[in-house]
Image (cartoon, helix red, strand yellow):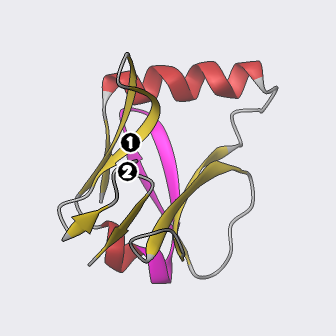
Amino acid sequence: MINVTDKAKERIVELRATEGHSDAHNIRVAVQGGGCSGLMYDLHFDDQLTDSDSVFEDKGVKIIVDKKSILYLAGTTLDFSDGLNGKGFQFINPNATRTCGCGESFSI
């Protein structure tokens, strides 16, 4: 469902420790309306599951996705860049037909 690069995994592990989260806190990825292209990604730690959630795992990283967001995220890769041209998590989403310049929002 959602793939995680080695760089993203390293950063997630580092952030979990830095922010004092336990191993029960997984990554929640959601898609919400907003941004200059119409849809935005939401990424945060979460230790709660609802009945409408699915849990995927790649490289030992568990990712929680709600039912509505699954449609937008199928085949997406979560990456992390710390280069000169930008720093942070990046979504490589094959479903996106357009993304904004900052990479924070997209449309399908």
Q: Which residue is mark 2?
A: 103
At mark 1, the secondary structure is strand
> Where does residue 80 sit, x and y in percent of width and height?
40, 30
Q: Count the marks: how many? A: 2
Q: Is residue 62 shown in magenta? A: yes
| The label number, if any, that marks residue 90 in the structure image | 1
- Magenta span: 54-69
Q: Amino acid at mark 2?
A: Gly
For residue 96, say whether it is visible. Answer: no
* Mark pair 2, 1: CA separation: 7 Å
Contact? badges 2 and 1 (CB < 8 Å): yes
For residue 43, say whether it is visible. Answer: yes
Q: Residues within 10 Å of mark 1 (few under 14, many from 20)?
A: some
Quarter of the image with the N terminus is bottom left
At mark 2, the secondary structure is loop
The answer to whether residue 24 is above or below residue 96 is above
Mark 2 vs 1, N-terminal side: 1
Q: Is residue 50 shown in magenta? A: no
Q: Residue at x 72, y 20 (%)?
A: 17
| The label number, if any, that marks residue 34 in the structure image | none
Q: Residue at x 25, y 58 (%)?
A: 93
Closest to the observer, 68 or 106: 106
Q: Nearer the viewer, mark 2 or mark 1?
A: 2
Q: Main secondary structure of the magenta part?
A: strand
